Image (tube, helix red, strand yellow):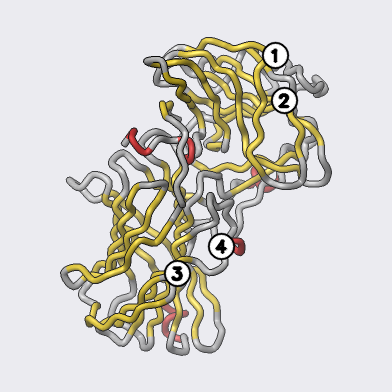
Amino acid sequence: MAFVTSRMWEDRIGRLDDVAEFQGVPVAVARMWGRPLVKRFVGEWLRGDTKALPNGREFRLSDASVLRWERHPNPASLPLALDGGDALKETIVIEKRPSRTELTFEIDLPPGSTLLYQPPLTPEEAAAGCIRPPEIVGSFAVYGPMGEKTGHLLRPHATDAGGRFEWLDLDAMELPNRPGTWQVRILPRSLAWLNEAVWPVTIDPTFGYTSVGASYGAGDGSTRQRYQKAAPSDSGNVESLTIYGKELYSSNTITLGLCNWGAGWMPTTLLRDGAGVATTTSAAWRTDTLDSVYAVTSGTNYALTLGYGSSYFQVYFDTGGTDVHAQDYGDVAYSQGTLHAPSGPNYYGGGGRIMSFYATIAEAATGQPFIKRFGGVPFAALNQGVW
C-alpha cells in the first residue's frame, strides 16, 4: 500500500475518447481518471473495414470476425462498484472456427502498475461468508504505482449461437523491457467446447474503472476487529480513516482506528480510534474522524483497524500481497467509539486481502492545503499532476 500527496480534483472516469485503426491495429483510447489508457488488439486480424457506433467503433477482422469497442450500455449490471458508472465494453463475434485459440491484447498502464490475479476464495474465506462473483474469479484487479486501485479486468465468457455458455481464462504479463505495457490473453478453458460450438461465437470481456475491491465479505459471529497493513511514504498527522462496505441485514455502526503493526502479521497496540460512524445496507465509503490526530512516521507499518458493530458488515476487498491482513477473534464486545487493544493469541493473520480502506492526513504545504492518504487509496483521491 502506498502513500500519496494530492489536491482533490474530478474528471469523468472511463470516458471512451477514441477508437481507431493505427498502423493496421485496432486501438481504443479511454480516459481513466484524467489519464489516457490505451488498449491494442494484437495480431494480423484487421481487414480494415470499420463502422462508427453511437458510443464506439466496430472493426471487421480478417477471419470474418467482428471486434466492437464501446462504452458499456448498462454498467450497473456489472459486479463492480464503478466510479462514475463507466466501463469499456468489448465484444468479439467470431463467425467461424478460427485457426488460433487465443486472443491477445496489449494495455498501456502507468509504469509500476500491477495486475493482481483474483483466484477462487479459499475454503476458509468461503466458510466465513465471503463473496467473489463468478466474473471476478480468474479476473485481474489493476493497481497503480502508488498502491491505488484503478480498474478491474473482468473474467470473459463466450456464448455460441445455440446459447451454450462457457467461462474463458485470462492470462496477463508485463512485457520485458516495456514498463507499463501488459499483454493480456483470452484463452479457452476447453477445446472440447470449441469443437462442439455452434458458430458464430460471441466473446464478452469488460474493463471496469473502479477504486473499490470486487469481492466482499462479513466477519463471522466471533470476529471483533480487522486490520489492514499500510505504510505512509511521508510523515504526518492522521486525522481520519475511510472504508468501503455495507451491512448485510440492517443499519448499525462501525468504529475505525489505527494500531501499530508488530512483527510478522500481528498488531499489538491501539494508537487511536474515532467516535464511530453509522452504516446502512447500501455500499458506500464511510469516514470516521479520530478523537485526536496521530503522528505517523514515513516507512513505518501501521494497522488500519475496523471494529464491527455487527459481524454482518461486509468489507470490499481484492486478493493480493502477503501478510497484509489480519482478523481478531477476541472476546471483547464491540462498543461504538472504543476499539479494544489487539488480542494477540486470537488472531487469524498472514492474509492477502487488500481492503478498500485508507487513512487521511491533512496538513499545510507552501501555504496551500493538500491531502495525503495511505492504504487502499481510491484513485479519485489522486491529483492528475502527480503522474
Q: Is residue 161 above or below residue 152?
A: below
Q: Look at the numbered discs 4 and 3 and tell me whether their residues touch, using CB distance below 8 Å.
A: no
SS for dot 4? helix
Do tag 2 and tag 3 residues touch (Cβ < 8 Å)? Answer: no
Q: Counting other residues with Cα less than 10 Å from the Cα at mark 2, is it few (<14), some (14-19), or many (20 or more)?
A: many
- Dividing the image into 4 quarters, which one contains the C terminus? top left
Whether residue 75 is visible, yes or no, is yes
Label 4, label 2: how far apart the Cα atoms are? 32 Å
Q: Nearer the viewer, mark 2 or mark 1?
A: 2
The answer for how far apart the CA atoms under marks 2 and 3 are is 44 Å
Res 189 label: 3
In the rendering, which numbered label is found on residue 255?
A: 2
Q: Residue 107, how many percent across, how many down?
A: 31, 56
Task: Give the mark toward the camera: 4 or 2.
Answer: 4
Q: Secondary structure at mark 1?
A: loop
Q: How many marks?
A: 4
Inter-mark Cα distance, 4 to 3: 26 Å
Label 1: how many residues lie within 10 Å, few (<14), some (14-19) or many (20+)?
some
Residue 40 or residue 135, whichever sits in front: 40
